[in-house]
Image: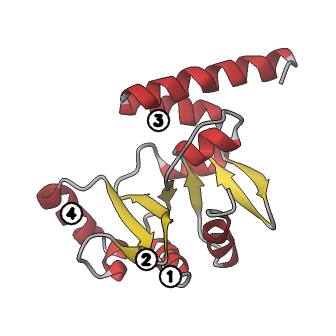
């Protein structure tokens, strides 16, 4: 996870309201699998979205699409991206470390405040990572419906069951 630690350090340092929802969240909840990026749901209010993009670009991440990263903070721009580019996530990548990529959801896969309230903070190196709760992550993964997402949901259900029974 060390390749992703600078991402979480930047977000935490900037006070960004975010919740990790993708493969990194699945791994940090206890299911070992490969993942290539960090999937985040951020508070999409203009000020919070601006803070998120500024934090990420401050560590060298750049949009993979030919757009101004500041446009992510503009709700009208995000709506345009969804309508005309069929964009689900706004991707930023570090040109000097191609494995370091972040995908910001341009629309919330679940209400942000609900995700935020139920999220958990887990230690990651010298910082923390804020993860969607197992229940929210299972729901998001099921809604996505892709084979890997459904496999993640099954693994998370097993982790939840083991924790509830005191086995994990």
Q: Nearer the viewer, mark 2 or mark 1?
A: 2
Quadrant where the N terminus is found in the figure: bottom right
Disc 1 marks which residue? Answer: 60
The circle on residue 81 is 4
| Circle count | 4
Residue 161 location (% of width, % of height): 72, 17
Residue found at x 24% / y 56%: 87
Q: Is residue 104 left or right of residue 7?
A: left
Q: Is residue 164 left or right of residue 97?
A: right
Residue 154 position by quadrant: top right
- Among the two numbered marks 3 and 1 on one chain, the one whose residue lies closer to the N terminus: 1
Q: CA distance from mark 1 to mark 4?
A: 23 Å
Secondary structure under badge 2? loop
Disc 2 marks which residue? Answer: 95
Does the CB distance between marks 2 and 1 fall below 8 Å?
yes
Q: CA distance from mark 3 to mark 1?
A: 29 Å
Residue 109 seen in this snapshot: yes
């Amino acid at each position: 996870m060390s390749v992703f630690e600078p991402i979480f350090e930047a977000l935490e340092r900037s006070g960004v309201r975010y919740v990790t929802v993708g493969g990194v969240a699945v791994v940090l909840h206890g299911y070992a699998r490969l993942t290539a990026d960090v999937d985040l749901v951020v508070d999409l209010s203009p000020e919070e979205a601006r803070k998120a993009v500024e934090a990420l670009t401050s560590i060298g991440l750049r949009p993979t699409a030919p757009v101004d990263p500041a446009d992510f903070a503009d709700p009208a721009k995000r709506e345009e991206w969804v309508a005309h580019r069929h964009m689900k996530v706004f991707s930023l990548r570090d040109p000097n470390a191609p494995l370091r990529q972040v995908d910001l959801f341009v629309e919330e896969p679940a209400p942000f405040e609900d995700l935020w309230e139920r999220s958990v903070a887990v230690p990651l190196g010298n910082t923390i990572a804020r993860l969607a709760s197992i229940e929210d992550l299972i729901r998001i993964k099921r809604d996505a419906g892709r084979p890997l997402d459904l496999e993640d949901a099954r693994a998370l259900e097993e982790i939840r069951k083991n924790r509830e029974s005191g086995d994990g």
